[in-house]
Amino acid sequence: MARQITTVLIDLSGTLHIDNTVIPGAVQALNRLRNANLSIKFVTNTTKESSNCLYERLTRLGFNLQKEEIFSSLAAARKLIISRRLKPMLLIDPAALEDFQDLVTEDTPDAVVIGLAPSKFNYDELNKAFRLLLNGASLIAIHEGRYYKQPDGLSLGPGAFVKGLEYSSNVKAEVIGKPTVGFFKAALEEIDPAQAIMIGDDVRDDVAGAQAVGIKGILVQTGKYRAGDENTITPGPAKVCSSFVDAVESILDEII
């Protein structure tokens, strides 16, 4: 690596855990990174639960982290809503509403904000969003994930529903989370991208998104990874590892 790595950005779902199951060895591997005095930030598109619920889940699973180390697309979306004084229709999972309770009003919404919300992806709710868009509301996608990993297999992400609303309303969505350049720059703050590395299971959102701003990307073959994913982006990942454990081993081999 051209410069000394000082910061590691880590995806959560599919990289460290799948629902309430820890990727084998991930807890210990994270502790090894901390012992190497590396700055760590968890960057996630997870919109299934509030920041408090996510933090509590991760600590219950045994991960050593601080709530302030989690940088989520939900938090980025909240900042955008506040900065623009939007009145949102929230198509997000009920478990994530805690992060937006103080932003909900009785006024007619002027923005449709959509995340992963399986219980909301029905005709009535989507049609309500469609009509708001026709009447001038903006469309904000917390992220456009194509699919994600559940214990019983891959499941549709919010991207399909975002694209459906775009198609029918002729309104282009503004995307907030990974893989946007703005998301990764905000996660880095003042850190030089050349001194950071990203570990994730999504070749586009995690790896290609990070590499677009100059961060090295490691693709792990867990979670939503499918054989051959590494060949679908140009340039390809800096490295492909079987798991987070192997990714950590690779990073430590470079810096020690």
Image: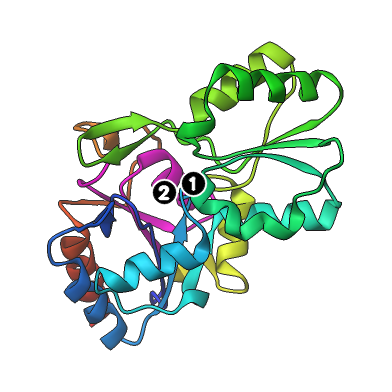
Identify the magenta region. Answer: 197-224
Q: Is residue 85 above or below residue 230?
A: below
Quarter occupied by residue 254: bottom left
How was the colour assigned to the protein in this rendering? rainbow
- Residue under the image location 20 percent in, 46 percent down: 221
Q: Nearer the viewer, residue 40 or 63?
A: 63
Specify few, some or many for label 1: CA neighbours under 10 Å numbering under 14, 14-19, or 20 or more: many
Screen quadrant of the C terminus: bottom left
Q: Is residue 43 above or below residue 55?
A: above
Q: Nearer the viewer, residue 235 or 140?
A: 140
- In the picture of the structure, the residue carrying the numbered disc 2 is 206
Residue 100 is left or right of residue 144, and the answer is: right
Residue 190 is left or right of residue 47, and the answer is: right
- Residue under the image location 35 percent in, 43 percent down: 202
Q: Nearer the viewer, residue 58 or 118?
A: 118
Estimate the spatial distance between the alpha carbons at disc 2 and disc 1, rounded to whole Å: 6 Å
Q: Amino acid at mark 2?
A: Asp
Quarter occupied by residue 78: bottom right
Q: Amino acid at mark 1?
A: Gly
User: Quick check: marks 2 and 1 in contact, CB under 8 Å?
Assistant: yes
Q: Position of residue 152 (x, y in %)?
A: 20, 35
Q: Position of residue 57 (x, y in %)?
A: 35, 65
